[in-house]
Amino acid sequence: MASVLLLCAALFLSWGCTCPELIFDDIRVREATITQFDPRWNTVQNTPVPTYSIHTFLFPSEPTSSGSLPNDDRIAFGNLLVVGQQTFQANGQTYTAQAVTDRPPNWIMRGDWMVVEVDSRVNPPQAWIRVAGQLSPPLSDRLFSASAEDFVNYLQSHRQQFNDAARRATPSGAGIPDSRQLPDVRIRILDAQGDDVTGSVSPPPEILEMLRTALEPAIDVRVQIGEVYYYRAKNGSEFAVLIEDIRPGTLPPNLNRMTIKFAQVPTTEGCQAP
């Protein structure tokens, strides 16, 4: 019995040590600019299209980092990413049904945030983003300022709101009112020689059922300038994220971009999460 009590005490102490102090005194404000994802490839000229961009944004795990923009080389040079596959027989021949995509859904993204679409003509400008972690609906108060000082003041005055937002965060932002689903994964059929025979041969229902998880639609969330979100990254870190800017680039072909300002925020929900 004593050993059990000692074990419980040790576990309690270890949990207490892993929880950060819930203070905002050391706020490191960081920024990142993410280009709209466009994996298209000109197969005739074997060159990328002018607006080609295959990076996403990966939130940092260290306070000294501002994150990174990893390229998704799995879909580089016009390649398709095979998410899942199953073989089947039809008309005495062997075929392979593949779930493929050139714009990875949330659960298989390289980074945390992808800019899927931008509309800078509306006021305020908006974008559709795809996230790999957990996202809350936007906080009720917006921040129409790019000032780091204003951002810090906003975070300090909204501590309780971030605790509430952390409890409402969902995987991929599922269920957020301004969200949508896109069927970005499709079926491709290959014959035994590797030739694409999609449309000529149909996979049986049981094969489609086996690929059902791989074919689940992606979830995108519409964001606008001035909105502030709670986000838990793939690495488990918690962030407050301000949608600071959404606009086309200056030089042609004027790539669409979104700039975010973010800082790590500790919440009671994040402290309790595994």
Image: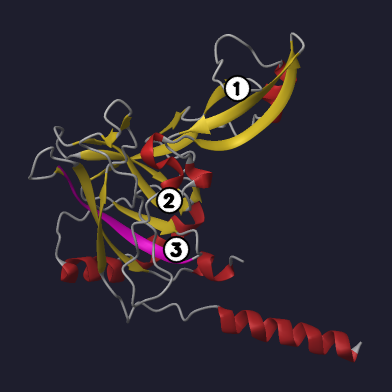
Residue type pointed to by label 1: Leu
Residue at disc 1, secondary structure: strand
What range is drawn magenta here? 237-247
Per the model, the C-alpha gap separating discs 2 and 3 is 11 Å
From where the camera sits, is residue 132 visible?
Answer: yes
User: Which numbered disc, 2 or 3, marks the residue that appears first in the sequence?
Assistant: 2
Q: Nearer the viewer, mark 2 or mark 3?
A: 2
- Picture quarter with the N terminus: bottom right
Is label 3 in a helix, a strand or a loop?
Answer: helix
Q: What is the quadrant of residue 164 in the picture?
A: bottom left
Residue situated in front as seen by the camera: 30 or 228: 30
Residue 217 shows up from this direction: no
User: Which residue is found at the position 32% from the left and 64% from the top?
Assistant: 158
Residue drawn at point x = 42 percent, y = 37 percent: 103
Image colouring: secondary structure
* Rendered residue at 43%/70% (across/down): 61
Above or below 85: residue 266: below
- Image height of 93 relative to 87, above or below: above
Amino acid, disc 2: Ser
Q: Position of residue 112 (x, y in %)?
A: 42, 53
Comparing labels 2 and 1, the label whose residue is closer to the camera: 1
Could you give the CA–CA distance between mark 1 and mark 3, rounded to whole angstroms? Answer: 50 Å
Q: Which residue is mark 2?
A: 136
Instruction: Measure how far apart labels 2 and 1 are at the Cα level.
Output: 41 Å
Q: Residue at x 48, y 27 (%)?
A: 183
